[in-house]
Structure formats: structure tokens, C-alpha cells
Image (tube, rainbow, N blue to C red):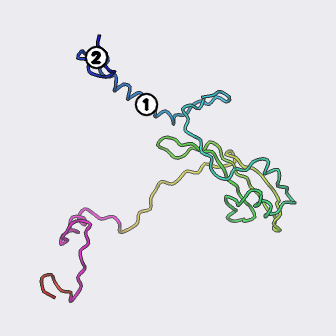
């Protein structure tokens, strides 16, 4: 018996003529499973084997940090020293600071999916002392549908006739710059 390397032609017909193609297709198929949602079982190792990686975003505030903020006592400077600059402040009421954080994951061929979102709201009185601290979660938010319509801008679309007849008289390679000649400019070959 002669030892033949795996995959080398042996001169006899193969029992599995498309084995390599099947192996490649299986590898590609399983490689794409990394974004498939799974039924995550808490406490079971490997339950998230085919999950996309979670991405932590924003300004995560711990319960320990929130516990150090005392309404009626802590000032604006105390909150900023403890938590840092806020993610946002109130548009119409600058006496509210928002610390926004979330956990997202990539969904195939779509936008990021939000797994969890937390907002810590710190409200100050006119003197700059903390008046209220509260947490908001995903259940407190509203889903807003994006408008997919596009406002047309006039003058950017040319008709078929404008495109056909617009190039009459233009000579040269598309995209090349032709020198502009004004009145009194020398014409080519005139010797000036």
C-alpha cells in the first residue's frame, strides 16, 4: 500500500467528489453564526457562544456613586467631581443633568441593537444644590421611528435631453480641466 497525502489525486474515483466544497460551505455557514441570537441561559457557561459581542457605551454610574449624592446637601461641583461631566444637560431646563449609558450589540445587516439603557437624572435647584436623583431605564423611553423621506433639492437632477445635449461642444477627457478663455485671450496657435 502506498501512502498518499490527504487530498492528493489517487487515480481512482472519490466516494465524496465534493467533500472540499461541503467543508468550505460548512465553515462559512458556521462562521456566520456569530451574530445569531441565542436563548441565553443565566448561569450556564457557553450559552452565549453564538452571540455577537456586547459593547458598553456611555457614562456608566454605579449604585455606590449614586449613594454618595445627597439631595439637599450635594452641590453641582460635588456631582461633577464624583461623576464627571454629564453626557447631556436639559435643552429647555439646564438645571437637569443626564448621565447616559447602554449596552449594545451588532445585528447582521442592521443598526446596533440596544440590550440595556440607563439614564441617571440629577436635578438641581436654582442655588446649584441637588434637588432630586432618579434612574430611567428602557421602559421609560419611547421608540421613535425615523423618517426615511428625502427632501429633493431643485436644480440637481437633469433630464435625459439635458444630459444628451449638455455635452455638445465639450471636447476632452471627462474630468479633465479645460483652461477658461475669456475675451481678448490668445487663441491656440496665434503666437501671442
In the image, which disc is placed on residue 29?
1
For the N terminus, give its image quadrant.
Answer: top left
90 horizontally vs 149: left or right: right
Name the residue beneath numbered marker 2: 14
User: Residue at left 75%, top 61%?
Assistant: 80
Q: Nearer the viewer, mark 2 or mark 1?
A: 2
Q: Is residue 53 magenta?
A: no
Describe the element under mark 1 as helix, strand or loop: helix
100 horizontally vs 106: left or right: right
Q: Position of residue 153 (x, y in %)?
A: 40, 66
In the image, which disc is placed on residue 56?
none
- Local packing at callout 1 (Cα closer than 10 Å; few below 14, some 14-19, many 20+) is few
Badge 2 vs badge 1, beta-carbon distance below 8 Å: no
For the C terminus, give its image quadrant.
Answer: bottom left
Calculate the distance from the C-alpha at mark 2 to the C-alpha at mark 1. 24 Å
Q: Is residue 171 magenta?
A: yes
Q: Position of residue 45 (x, y in %)?
A: 63, 28
- Label 2 vs 1, first from the N-terminus: 2
Magenta highlight: main SS: loop
User: Residue at left 16%, top 84%?
Assistant: 187
User: Residue at left 33%, top 64%?
Assistant: 157
Q: What residue range appears in magenta? A: 156-184
User: Residue at left 21%, top 87%?
Assistant: 185
Q: From this view, report whether residue 43 is shown above or below residue 81.
A: above
Residue 185 vs residue 39, the one in the foreground: 185
Quadrant location of residue 186? bottom left
Q: Looking at the image, how many numbered discs can be counted on the residues?
A: 2
Q: Position of residue 42 (x, y in %)?
A: 67, 30
155 horizontally vs 170: left or right: right
Amino acid at each position: 500500500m502506498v501512502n498518499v497525502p490527504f487530498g492528493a489525486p489517487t487515480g481512482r474515483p472519490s466516494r465524496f467528489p465534493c467533500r472540499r466544497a461541503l467543508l468550505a460551505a460548512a465553515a462559512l455557514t458556521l462562521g456566520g453564526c456569530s451574530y445569531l441570537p441565542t436563548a441565553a441561559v443565566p448561569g450556564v457557561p457557553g450559552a452565549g457562544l453564538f452571540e455577537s459581542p456586547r459593547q458598553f457605551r456611555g457614562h456608566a454610574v454605579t449604585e455606590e456613586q449614586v449613594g454618595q449624592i445627597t439631595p439637599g446637601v450635594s452641590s453641582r461641583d460635588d456631582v461633577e467631581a464624583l461623576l464627571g461631566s454629564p453626557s447631556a444637560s436639559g435643552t429647555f431646563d439646564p438645571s437637569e443633568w443626564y448621565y447616559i449609558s447602554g449596552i449594545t450589540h451588532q445585528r447582521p445587516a442592521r443598526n446596533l441593537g440596544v440590550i440595556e439603557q440607563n439614564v441617571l437624572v440629577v436635578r438641581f435647584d436654582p442655588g446649584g444644590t441637588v434637588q432630586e436623583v432618579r434612574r430611567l431605564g428602557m421602559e421609560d423611553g419611547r421608540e421613535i421611528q425615523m423618517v426615511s423621506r428625502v427632501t429633493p433639492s431643485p436644480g440637481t437632477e437633469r433630464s435625459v435631453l439635458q444630459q444628451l445635449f449638455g455635452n455638445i461642444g465639450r471636447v476632452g477627457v471627462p474630468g479633465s480641466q479645460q483652461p477658461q478663455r475669456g475675451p481678448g485671450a490668445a487663441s491656440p496657435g496665434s503666437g501671442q
